[in-house]
């Protein structure tokens, strides 16, 4: 250790340590390193954990919405019974009597004895008599034949089977009594009460506030569809045109800067502000129809345009300048170079961005509420194409919101179910975007 | 004449014009297209554009202006006595429009004759019956003045539309002829067409400016209207939010402070969740993770960003809220009264913001040059020391920008707070209390059967203005910081 | 403290500071360094020369295990520093790099003040007990980096605001501040103008008094000017290693001769 004497600036003698022995300080530093890394792992795990919890609660709570509790009976009615019932004063009561007998028969087959009356049936099924009567009045040929009926059970029966209503939480009421639960158990045992796939949920429209069982998302899916049509038809040409101008033609001046600043700021403006814009401009000022998918589509177009412009510009920028030079070099005008060469090459990227923008628009709720596209206006499917754009309708997320804010917890299940359908749409759009990207993406 | 037909006719004129223009110029040179200045299609397109663009512009302007003009014409014709029992001029006008639409529908479905619908002396009960039969909703009993105004409205609108049809069709024809006259071989058709396309491109790009302008104008006008009915100082400095539901005017307390407090409190909770998790996730993904882990974890986090906010809202209301109640509710710790609270909304919003913070920070951390890392490793620094002492300080401006953007996102978020935060506006420090935010109140004041002239509805625009100004400020600052940061390493 | 030093000083009796034995480096499937054996002496400037892509920088990065930071890189064979294998699993690369400092091709000062740049190493390695000691270390390092006179009045100014040559000398001062035993320099002058290059070369010659300096360079003139020993790499092989004078005047291998006379490279 003599280097100190050589050192003109007088460094202290260096201590010689072995590399294979880790000193205390390094050990402490390595522990800090391990801790830091663990924080990172923990952060990722927390994120993934939330994702799993979210997925789990959606699936667990949403799946029951796709099935419904039904009372399924083989039912036979003779011509004589029919005439007898039609002759009575309370016709539907008479039909209910036949139904009760049929159910009682089923129970007796299995040797089960249960005491129940018309009141219990009404609590379980609502008013089944009228359903039966309508069926036989419309289909007289069924008289004397065995007909298989699936009658939707009341929401609380449904709740009992899905665990929403339990023996502990049930309070006797005119809706459901404790004694009914025994009956339900027995009917489940003989297979009269079962669960069947609920087509009405997928195809139907919104129901009244006291009928969660009859609520369907079909009408608002159509509302969303017409809205997305508007967004697609407007945002693709406008977005592409604006991007081409900004990327290929815009001169460097204050006007271009103004547009650029506007686009990047609009991309971060809260969506509800676009709802206010839609309400004030499209409905109050231009008197377009309230709650119409057309207006919803216009608002969502304005909202997604910045996103689409940003991604389209990125795709245009990715096309190398040599392509433009080549086209200009053979005498094409700037416009021809862009439309014949640059745009087709950028198209896969543009479409990917567009689909992602559409997916974002499809899930948006807040602006729709302000222009009146709330769930309860979705009472039926529109008649015809024009009506699809202009008649009041809702959209999937707004319908989900309406269900979530209703008092009857039976609607919560529908809300979760609606989310499953919404997510299926979003997932397929994203998968489509990924496929497009994989299939056509070009690396220069 | 439905709009679809008018557009179809214009399109047909334009299409025929295209073919004629093309043919005319080809005939002029006996089919030798080399003698043309531009390709034949450009001559056709020139005719097409000159037919289509002016006609469509006229159509749009007419459609926008006519209802405004007719509205003012009809409402000025209403006498004061007609309005006396009615709620407000706006409601009366809505009623008139509805009745006019009903008449239209009744005539179309054949339950009412055209003569009856036009007859000013028509028997009111007969008309009302006809309306109901046609299935149109007549809210209150139709009164004589309203019926007469509706008939007048319908008549003027009808005349207007007929005039519009002829004006637009003539415009299209005129444009087509003008374009055809120019279809000569030496005409520089390509230049004209390209100029027109360029104008279209500029117009498309200007929509961004128009949107901003539309937002600002609709907020400003309605906010001014609101401050005319309600004092601005009480709005900005009032600590009580209690809009009255039935009455109008002075009965409501519309102080914005409790809403702002709720907004900021929830955002702070959300950022407290999102910033550490998002930042550490970004650090792990960009500095530690193997390519395989990165390829799986990054999309998994991004899925969180692609989930619609309504899903998070429902998650807050139905999963997180009840879960928190189990821990903090009256049966356990007893500091939480209901599932909807600041904590519920804040937590869920935090989850939503994780991918937002992490992907922005990931980009920013990756923008720090590798040379910085090499320099630090070369001096014997561990990875975490390099990250904490070199990379993060270097990336700090960018990360701050990302956090500001996330904050702006949190402040503007609507569905999570509407469903998860509760409806009560209060100034409280307990994060387990229900509170409400600016965005949630915009929704609640503007949905339902609000009368747009009342301060209770107009306050939503003032709230929107407040929200817009705050988020715009945050965005501008954040975007400036991020841009400056990017330039530093370009 | 001093007795450990005495006990271990036996290791340094030899003039050989670093000795590499059968070193192989792979980047994925690419065999970048093939069977390199070399002994690098203490208090000497050793230059690695060779055409682009010959592996000289790769080998340099093996000496302080910078290749660890690249996922696909794999190193085989032994590199001994004072007789200890630095690729021994017991060796902490962090401790190793404190002993074997590195200066990079492009000046890479941290976006911090000049003072903080130099103090970074001493701080993380805990070399100073208090502020006064740290000040002293920083001043000494800046003096040894031959930049003290230029920056002593603006130590709080950002290091990124200096000129290219100053930045590189700052980076050398930063490397020196941790009291390393070996200084690795990866083409330290390639991003500098001739005047700055001359200053840095002068500095390298001074540093030789205290450190074993290994420099990778593109320029044969630079190798001839600053180094005492020169190693010529070609296609991942160490072709020839000898005194600089000998390499440049009478190389043994025909490939070396071709390179220094400008026929390959």
Image (cartoon, helix red, strand yellow):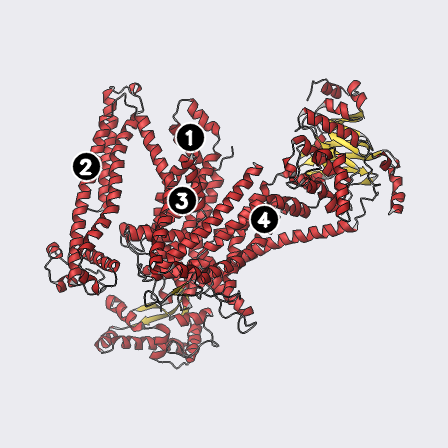
| Mark 4, other Cα within 10 Å: few <14 / some 14–19 / many ≥20 | many
Given residues A274 and C265, the one toward you in this image is A274
Q: Chain of mark 3?
A: A
Answer with mark 4 or mark 2, whichever residue precedes in sequence.
2
* Vertical comparison of A232 with B195: above or below: below
Is residue C241 placed above or below B395 in the rendered structure?
above
In the rendered structure, the answer to whether residue B152 lies left or right of residue A379 reads left
Dot label at residue A341: 1
Check disc 1 and report its element: helix, strand or loop.
helix
In depth, the one of C223 and B312 nearer the eye is C223
Q: On the image, numbered disc 3 is attached to which residue?
A: A305
Residue occupied by mark 2: B170
Q: Are marks 1 and 3 in contact (CB under 8 Å)?
A: no
Q: What whole-number distance in Å separates the C-alpha atoms at marks 2 and 3?
A: 34 Å
Measured in 3D between alpha carbons, the distance from the residue under mark 4 to the one under mark 2, in whole angstroms, is 62 Å
Q: Is label 1 on the same chain as label 3? A: yes
Q: Is residue C145 left or right of residue B18?
A: right
Q: Are marks 4 and 2 on the same chain?
A: yes
């Amino acid at each position: 250790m003599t280097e100190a004497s050589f050192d003109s600036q007088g460094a202290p003698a260096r201590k010689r340590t072995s590399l294979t022995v880790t000193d205390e300080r390094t050990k402490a530093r390595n522990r800090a390193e391990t801790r830091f890394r663990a924080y990172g792992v923990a952060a990722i795990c927390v994120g993934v954990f939330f994702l799993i919890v979210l997925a789990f609660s959606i699936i667990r709570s949403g799946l029951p919405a796709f099935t419904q509790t039904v009372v399924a009976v083989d039912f036979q009615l003779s011509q004589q019974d029919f005439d007898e019932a039609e002759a009575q004063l309370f016709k539907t009561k008479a039909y209910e009597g036949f139904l009760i007998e049929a159910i009682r028969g089923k129970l007796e087959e299995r040797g089960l004895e249960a005491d129940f009356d018309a009141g219990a049936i009404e609590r379980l099924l609502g008013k089944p008599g009228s359903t039966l009567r309508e069926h036989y009045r419309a289909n007289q040929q069924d008289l004397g034949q065995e007909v298989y009926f699936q009658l939707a059970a009341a929401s609380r029966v449904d709740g009992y089977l899905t665990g929403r209503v339990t023996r502990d939480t049930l309070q006797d009421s005119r809706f459901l009594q404790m004694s009914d639960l025994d009956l339900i158990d027995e009917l489940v045992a003989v297979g009269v009460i079962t669960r069947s796939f609920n087509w009405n949920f997928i195809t139907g429209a919104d129901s009244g506030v006291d009928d969660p069982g009859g609520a369907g998302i079909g009408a608002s899916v159509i509302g969303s569809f017409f809205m997305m049509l508007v967004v697609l038809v407007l945002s693709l040409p406008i977005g592409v045109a604006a991007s081409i101008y900004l990327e290929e033609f815009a001169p460097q001046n204050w006007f271009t800067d103004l547009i650029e600043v506007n686009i990047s700021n609009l991309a971060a403006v809260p969506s509800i502000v676009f709802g206010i814009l839609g309400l004030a401009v499209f409905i109050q000022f231009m008197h377009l129809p309230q709650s119409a998918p057309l207006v919803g589509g216009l608002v969502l177009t304005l909202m997604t345009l910045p996103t689409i412009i940003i991604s389209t510009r990125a795709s245009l920028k990715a096309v190398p300048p040599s392509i433009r030079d080549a086209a200009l070099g053979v005498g094409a005008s700037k416009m021809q170079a862009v439309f014949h060469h640059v745009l087709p090459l950028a198209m896969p990227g543009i479409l990917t961005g567009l689909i992602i923008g559409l997916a974002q628009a499809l899930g948006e709720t807040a602006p729709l509420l302000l222009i009146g596209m709330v769930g309860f206006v979705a009472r039926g499917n529109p008649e015809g194409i024009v009506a699809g754009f202009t008649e009041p309708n809702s959209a999937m997320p707004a319908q989900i919101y309406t269900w979530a804010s209703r008092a009857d917890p039976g609607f919560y299940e529908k809300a979760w179910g609606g989310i499953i359908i919404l997510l299926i749409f979003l997932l397929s759009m994203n998968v489509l975007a990924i496929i497009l990207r994989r299939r056509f993406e070009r690396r220069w | 004449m439905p709009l679809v037909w008018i557009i179809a006719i214009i399109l047909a004129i334009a299409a025929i014009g295209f073919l004629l223009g093309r043919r005319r110029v080809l005939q002029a040179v006996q089919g030798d297209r080399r003698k043309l200045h531009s390709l034949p299609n450009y001559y056709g397109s020139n005719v097409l554009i000159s037919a289509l663009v002016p006609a469509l512009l006229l159509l749009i302007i007419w459609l926008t202006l006519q209802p405004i003009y007719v509205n003012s014409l009809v409402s000025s014709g209403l006498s004061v006595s007609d309005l006396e029992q009615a709620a407000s001029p706006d409601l009366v006008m809505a009623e008139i429009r509805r009745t006019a639409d009903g008449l239209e529908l009744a005539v179309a479905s054949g339950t009412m004759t055209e003569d009856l619908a036009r007859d000013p002396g028509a028997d009111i009960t007969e008309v009302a019956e006809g309306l109901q039969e046609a299935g149109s909703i007549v809210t209150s009993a139709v009164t004589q003045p309203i019926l007469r105004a509706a008939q007048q409205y319908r008549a003027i609108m009808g005349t207007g539309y007929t005039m519009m049809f002829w004006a637009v069709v003539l415009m299209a024809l005129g444009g087509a002829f003008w374009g055809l006259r120019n279809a000569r071989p030496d005409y520089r058709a390509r230049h004209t067409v390209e100029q027109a396309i360029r104008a279209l491109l500029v117009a498309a790009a200007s929509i961004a400016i128009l949107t901003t302008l539309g937002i600002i104008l609709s907020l400003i006008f309605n906010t001014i209207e609101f401050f005319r009915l309600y004092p601005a100082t009480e709005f900005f400095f009032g600590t009580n939010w209690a809009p009255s539901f039935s009455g109008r005017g002075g009965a409501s307390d519309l102080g914005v402070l409790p809403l702002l407090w709720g907004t900021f409190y929830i955002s702070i909770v959300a950022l407290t969740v999102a910033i550490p998790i998002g930042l550490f996730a970004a650090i792990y993904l960009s500095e530690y993770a193997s390519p395989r882990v990165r390829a799986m974890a990054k999309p998994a986090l991004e899925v969180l960003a692609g989930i619609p906010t309504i899903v998070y809202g429902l998650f807050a209301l139905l999963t997180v809220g009840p879960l928190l109640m189990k821990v903090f509710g009256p049966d356990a710790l007893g500091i939480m009264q209901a599932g909807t609270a600041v904590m519920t909304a804040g937590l869920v919003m935090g989850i939503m913001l994780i991918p937002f913070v992490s992907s922005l920070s990931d980009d920013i951390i990756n923008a720090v040059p590798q040379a910085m890392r090499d320099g630090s490793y070369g001096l014997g620094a561990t990875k975490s020391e390099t990250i904490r002492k070199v990379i993060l300080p270097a990336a700090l401006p960018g990360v701050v920008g990302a956090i500001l953007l996330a904050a702006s996102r949190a402040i503007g978020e609507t569905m999570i707070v509407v469903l998860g935060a509760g409806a009560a506006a209060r100034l409280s420090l307990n994060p387990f209390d229900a509170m409400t935010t600016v965005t949630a109140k915009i929704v609640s004041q503007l949905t339902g059967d609000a009368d747009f002239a009342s301060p209770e509805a107009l306050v939503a625009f003032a709230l929107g203005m407040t929200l817009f100004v705050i988020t715009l400020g945050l965005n501008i600052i954040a975007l400036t910081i991020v841009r400056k940061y990017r330039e530093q390493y370009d | 403290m001093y007795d450990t030093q005495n006990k271990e000083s036996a290791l340094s009796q030899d003039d050989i500071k670093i000795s590499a034995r059968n070193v192989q480096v792979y980047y994925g499937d690419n065999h970048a360094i093939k069977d390199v054996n070399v002994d690098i002496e203490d208090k000497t400037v050793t230059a690695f020369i060779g055409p682009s892509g010959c592996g000289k920088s790769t080998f340099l990065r093996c000496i302080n295990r910078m290749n660890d930071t690249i996922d696909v890189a794999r190193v085989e064979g032994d590199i001994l520093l004072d007789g200890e294998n630095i690729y021994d699993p017991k060796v902490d690369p962090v401790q190793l790099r404190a002993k074997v400092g590195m200066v990079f091709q492009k000046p890479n000062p941290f976006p911090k003040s000049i003072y903080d740049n130099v103090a970074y190493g001493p701080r993380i390695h805990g070399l100073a007990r208090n502020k006064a000691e740290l000040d002293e270390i920083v001043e000494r390092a800046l003096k040894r980096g031959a930049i003290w006179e230029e920056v002593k009045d603006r130590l709080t100014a950002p290091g990124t605001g200096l000129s290219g040559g100053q930045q590189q000398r700052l980076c050398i001062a930063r490397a020196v501040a941790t009291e390393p035993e070996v200084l690795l320099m990866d083409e330290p002058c390639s991003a500098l103008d001739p005047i700055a290059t001359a200053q840095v070369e002068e500095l390298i010659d001074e540093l030789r008094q205290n450190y074993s300096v290994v420099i990778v360079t593109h320029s044969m003139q630079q190798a001839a000017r600053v180094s005492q020993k020169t190693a010529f790499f070609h296609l991942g092989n160490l072709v020839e290693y000898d005194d600089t004078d000998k390499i440049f005047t009478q190389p043994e291998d025909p490939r070396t001769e071709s390179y220094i006379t400008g026929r390959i490279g």
